[in-house]
Image: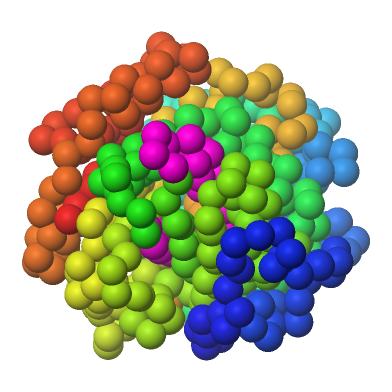
Amino acid sequence: MSARASNHPYKISDASQMPYYNNSAPGGENGGFHAVENNLDRHYSSPDDGSQRISSSNTQVFEAQYCTLESSSANGVYPAQSSTSSHSISSLSGSPLSQHDSHSDHTYSSPPSASCLTEVADLQIKLKELENAILGPELDITSDSPESFLQANVQLRPDNWRQLLGIDAGDLKQVIIACGKAVADNDVFATELLISELGQLVSVSGDPMQRLGAYMLEGIVARLSSSGSMLYKSLKCKEPTGSELMSYMHLLYEICPFYKFGYMSANGAIAEAIKGENFVHIIDFQIAQGSQWITLIQALAARPGGPPYIRITGIDDSNSAYARGGGLDIVGRRLHSVALSCGLPFEFNAVPAASHEVQLEHLAVRPGEIIAVNFAYQLHHVPDESVSMENHRDRIIRMIKSINPRVVTLVEQESNTNTAPFFQRYMETLNYYTAMFESIDVALPRDDRRRMSAEQHCVARDIVNLIACEGAERVERHELFGKWKARFAMAGFRPYPLSSVVNNTINTLLRSYNSCYSLEERDGVLYLGWKNRVLVVSSAWF
């Protein structure tokens, strides 16, 4: 999708200049947006029949009909998985599917066998190596069938394989870690057992570790099912409607202060930087609904001496367009209406594009205006040299430096998942989202259907992407603040300290949520944490 700046920006001088809009989204002209299907769609759900199955065979991949992240908005229940395979992994656990299903409507049944990922001969070698450790030398296995061996070793000595892998019975976190390690090591035997074990322990209505484990299991199965561009083709299923997705996003915004923290700190830095200026151009690299700018517009409209002229360039791609229910014209109309009600002169420039597609000409910079640039939870989606021959991440930062902005705000998750190898990235995902799910847990009851839907459609897709995808298909590529700091310094930026007023306001916000949240300032940079884990870092540059 190519980026194109709007030829007819929204301007306010009087109400008569605002054209009439009906409820339909524009077709894509004059800064509109063409909603197109692409292979970077990150919403997943189940097939029309609501089932989730993988057939076991002698092929080298899982069947593609296994689709993750079924929408639970209708009944709040995550459907159980079942396997049609005659060699289902559920048989390896000694727990029949019928017994598992009777436990809970929200638990996962045993996922299907991963034995199709290797030849039988390789599996037999692995089994023979483990025979004495699992069964003991006194037992004589007469069958040459690998399936018979697996069933025997689990049914006769059910705890030995856990001891062999260093797992305490019922310790979910240890099972999650061991499963990721087995996948990283291509250990098919251990992967089968651990996927089966996970399927009986996780639940989207359970405690934080059970819920996170459910989505990490989704990621593991998706990773084993396919890779690269095939992943999105095999998992491209139904999505929630735009209005449903918006309600889930709004709920997550209300129960998690991460997003409010980021937007408040960015707004505070911008407001401080443009004091007394009369012509201000704000460039937002992921404007979404545009809600971040409503409070800033209202505050600037009440400024002593009169409001400034504000121009906002809104950049966004098809993911947010789907959630909005239309293109960027919707955002322009909304912000225009707010500015008009406050008596603030306003103009909106729409750039319908992914961040890495943006070029200098799309920003439509004018002489004499003060520029503020906002990167809130967005730069980690821009590919760098590890993904593309052209390092778009550094290119975008250098491009912004070339327009001499007064301030640039950066808000990002404090997580290391960009270039990390699979198991390190897997562990980082586990540790980061454990803290996030714990924070959500104190905000809403575990059986709250809205919470399940919000986690499923707004958080789980990122977890699945982190675990299942590689290359260009992995769009969740977070970096630690130290790496961002180096990137901005190389482009010629210097830190812009945040004001104490902003810090005090955010501290008040956090106290209204939970005492486990913490806010720390180091060298003008704000670190938001949950217990002992830093989750979000906010900084400003000039």
- Image coordinates of residue 194 in percent, x first then y, are 51, 46
Residue 161 in the image, given as x and y percentages of width and height = 45, 40
Which one is in front, 497 or 49? 497
- Of 516 and 19, nearer the camera is 19
Q: What stretch is highlighted in magenta?
A: 280-306
Left/right placement of residue 359 relative to residue 239 reads left
Number of marks in picture:
0
Q: Is residue 293 magenta?
A: yes
Any part of residue 24 in sight: yes
The quadrant of the rendering that contains the N terminus is bottom right
Q: Which residue is drawn at 9% across and 65% down?
A: 492
Residue 185 picture location, percent across and down: 34, 61
Find residue 295 and report its horizontal and vertical position in percent. Answer: 52, 38
Q: Report the quarter where the C terminus lies.
A: bottom left
Residue 99 in magenta stretch: no
**Residue at figure coordinates x 60%, y 61% from the top left:** 12
Q: Nearer the viewer, residue 301 or 181?
A: 301
Q: Quadrant of residue 472?
A: bottom left
Q: Is residue 183 visible?
A: no
In the rendered structure, the answer to whether residue 418 lies left or right of residue 115 reads left
